Amino acid sequence: MRAVSTDSKIAVLVVEDEEPIRSGLCDVLTFHGYGAEPVGRGDDGLARARSGDHALVLLDVMLPGLDGFEVCESLRAEGCQVPVLMLTARGAEEDVLRGFRCGADDYVVKPFSVAELTARVEALLRRSGALDREDPASAAFDFGALRVDPGSLCARSGTGEDARAVDLTPRDVEVLRLLARERGRIVSRRALLAEVWGYPNPDRVETRSVDMHIAKLRKKLGARSGSEAGDWIETVRGAGYRHPA
């Protein structure tokens, strides 16, 4: 795969017609060490993606010229296998399924957090072999008896007949990473909103998103051996959450 840019960074093509979103995506990618090329039209995006200069395409669905589905379909019909991450406000199941049928590798529904986007970008780049450098954000880590692998979005425990695997979302991984890093200490909802959800002013946000997400994550993880379900993550009433030491 040829995936270079003028500054030797891994190149990502950003095809998004709304300038503020396009600029924001490019800023995030640049901050994380990628080379970002912005394009505002679907037909222009298709032409640039055909060049083979990019390791990944971030592709909005609603675009002038050609929509994202048409761009992705054309690339796949021409044999281009560059990973495509579709970005859209259309979260209906039929739209998501259509994106995958067109050949998209992943699908993110707006609004999404910076943590979720960068985790998905990195997972696709690593899966394609374009990302071969190690960095702390991609390294596997322990969460109690679980081994969490951000690259495969999976947590594993046990061996042999006792082995089990838990599928995770990028946000699940970021929640577990933060709690593991602060093991034994309380992590407030405000800290989770800032570091995982990406809210710049979490004090002004009124949402139950954190509590709902933690509840779903507990259900996925199940019970620790010999313990009650959910105690991988303790609730500290009125304060936040804690991974037991």
Image (tube, grey):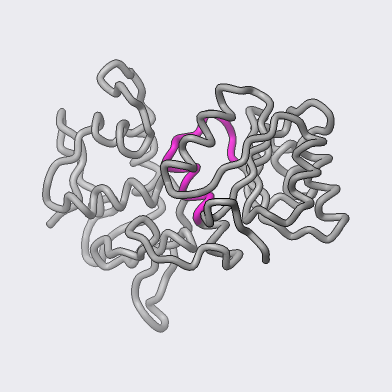
Secondary structure of the magenta portion, mostly? helix
Closer to the camera in the image, 183 or 214: 183
Label total for image: 0
Q: Looking at the image, is 152 positioned above or below residue 36?
A: below
Is residue 110 one of those drawn in magenta? Answer: yes
Q: Is residue 165 left or right of residue 50?
A: left
Q: Is residue 88 left or right of residue 161?
A: right
Q: Looking at the image, is 1 positioned above or below residue 108?
A: below
Closer to the camera in the image, 236 or 34: 34
| Image location of residue 154, percent across then percent down | 45, 62
| Image location of residue 205, percent across then percent down | 33, 19
| Image location of residue 105, percent across then percent down | 66, 53
Q: Quadrant of the C terminus?
A: bottom left
Residue for point 30% across, 52% down = 177
Q: Quadrant of the N terminus?
A: bottom right
Magenta part of the chain: 108-122
Residue for point 38% across, 47% down = 217
Is residue 39 one of those drawn in magenta? Answer: no
Q: Is residue 93 left or right of residue 173?
A: right
Q: Looking at the image, is 135 positioned above or below residue 185?
A: below
Closer to the camera in the image, 96 or 11: 11
Residue for point 20% across, 46% down = 234
| Image location of residue 165, percent across then percent down | 44, 67
Identity of the residue furthest to the front in this view: 6
Q: Is residue 19 left or right of residue 137?
A: right
Residue for point 24% across, 29% down = 190
